[in-house]
Amino acid sequence: MGTADDLADSLIAELVAFIAQVPLLQPVERTSVAERHLWRACELCTYLEYRFTGAPDPRSLRDDALREWTARGLASGEAPGDPNDLLGYRPYWVAISGRRLGTVAVTVRSLGWGEPSLWVASLYLFREERRGGNGTLIMAVLEGIARHLGLGGIRLETQWLWQGAVRFYLRHGFWVANWNRGLSLVRHFADPRYRIWADGTRMDFILGAATDSATLISARRRGDTLVWEEPPGAGQGADAEPRGAPAPTFALWLAVSGWPLIRGAREWEHRYHWSDTGMPEGLAYKITVFEAYARHCGFAVDTPRIPGLVYPSWEAC
């Protein structure tokens, strides 16, 4: 019997062979100095666009400018990804009719349980390509690839401070796997879709289609605190319970909507218990850490202000 690594290697070979037939994705020529340079510039600008007003277009960055922006715009331990060193990811240009729209990198991984998933990284679109449904097209193509290979879903990593990316992935039905070092998001194909209903004073996390749905969690505001309600028995049972985690996913929806995340003093005392994933206080705590470090590095922070949340300095975290 083959190992999980053997299975992943076999699936990666199938992945590369199948993508060769997908017109939208063109392999990066990894021996080309120019292509490697542009890829690194796109990776760098993924960070810069959320950290600086007037971040450059990656296609304008020559060698000196790339080095200067790297020194100015990245934190300790960060570096622009190189297509020759992507930890197993295969790099591709996203292109339509010969026009490059941006970048994406993919691989197949298994965490040791459930089906392997398509892991996605380095998804970047040039600014003029971010309208007209190009992002949705890319996600549809990636889903088609994953389903063709018989994979269980799609998984990716993003950052709380990258609000445009976070909102995009939430709109496309991703669930929160954890918020340990950033935001790890996943969409299991076997899960029913969820939807969010909100009217300004109440927000509901609803699982399933409109004709066969269940409200798993409801939230209301009480001043600067959150009222969190889970109807008895909601989502229970093998047929109804998704692999995705409703509570942290709903917490992230509340956060991007600028809602309170703290239910009360007792729950806030347990925030460290949920510092990897779980209830909204855990996300609230990690938001303060993510934002404190960004300010410590001198980066701009453009995120919703969470009512009732105190934002300490990095030294006080």
Image (tube, rainbow, N blue to C red):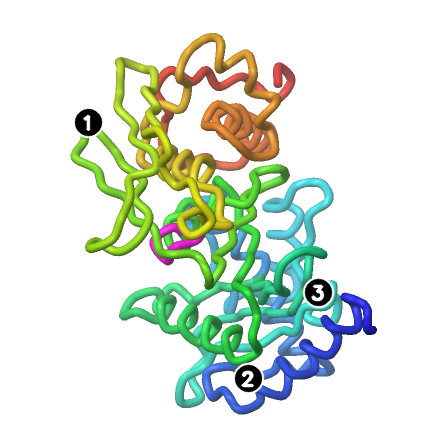
Q: Could you tell me which residue is drawn at 55 percent across and 65 percent down? A: 152
Quadrant of the rendered image containing residue 41: bottom right
Horizontal and vertical percent position of residue 160: 49, 40
Q: Could you tell me which residue is drawn at 42 percent across and 38 percent down? A: 252
For label 3, the residue is: 86
Q: Is residue 150 left or right of residue 307?
A: right
Quadrant of the rendered image containing residue 225: top left
Q: Is residue 42 left or right of residue 13?
A: left
Q: Could you tell me which residue is drawn at 25 percent across and 53 percent down? A: 212
Looking at the image, is mark 2 or mark 3 earlier in the sequence? 2
**What's the residue type where badge 2 is placed?**
Gln
Q: Pointer 2 and pointer 1: residues touching (CB < 8 Å)? A: no
Horizontal and vertical percent position of residue 125: 44, 66
Horizontal and vertical percent position of residue 242: 46, 49
For label 1, the residue is: 201
**What's the residue type where badge 3 is placed?**
Leu
> SS for tag 3?
loop
> SS for tag 1?
loop
> How far is disc 1 from disc 3 in space, using C-alphas?
44 Å
Label 3, residues with CA under 10 Å away: few <14, some 14-19, many ≥20: some
Observer able to see residue 50: no
Highlighted magenta segment, given as a residue range? 170-174
Quadrant of the rendered image containing residue 182: top right
> SS for tag 2?
strand
> How far is disc 2 from disc 3 in space, using C-alphas?
17 Å
For label 2, the residue is: 26
Label 1, residues with CA under 10 Å away: few <14, some 14-19, many ≥20: few
**What's the residue type where badge 1 is placed?**
Thr
Q: Pointer 2 and pointer 3: residues touching (CB < 8 Å)? A: no
Query: In the image, which is nearer the foreground, mark 2 or mark 1?
Result: 1
Looking at the image, is mark 1 or mark 3 earlier in the sequence? 3
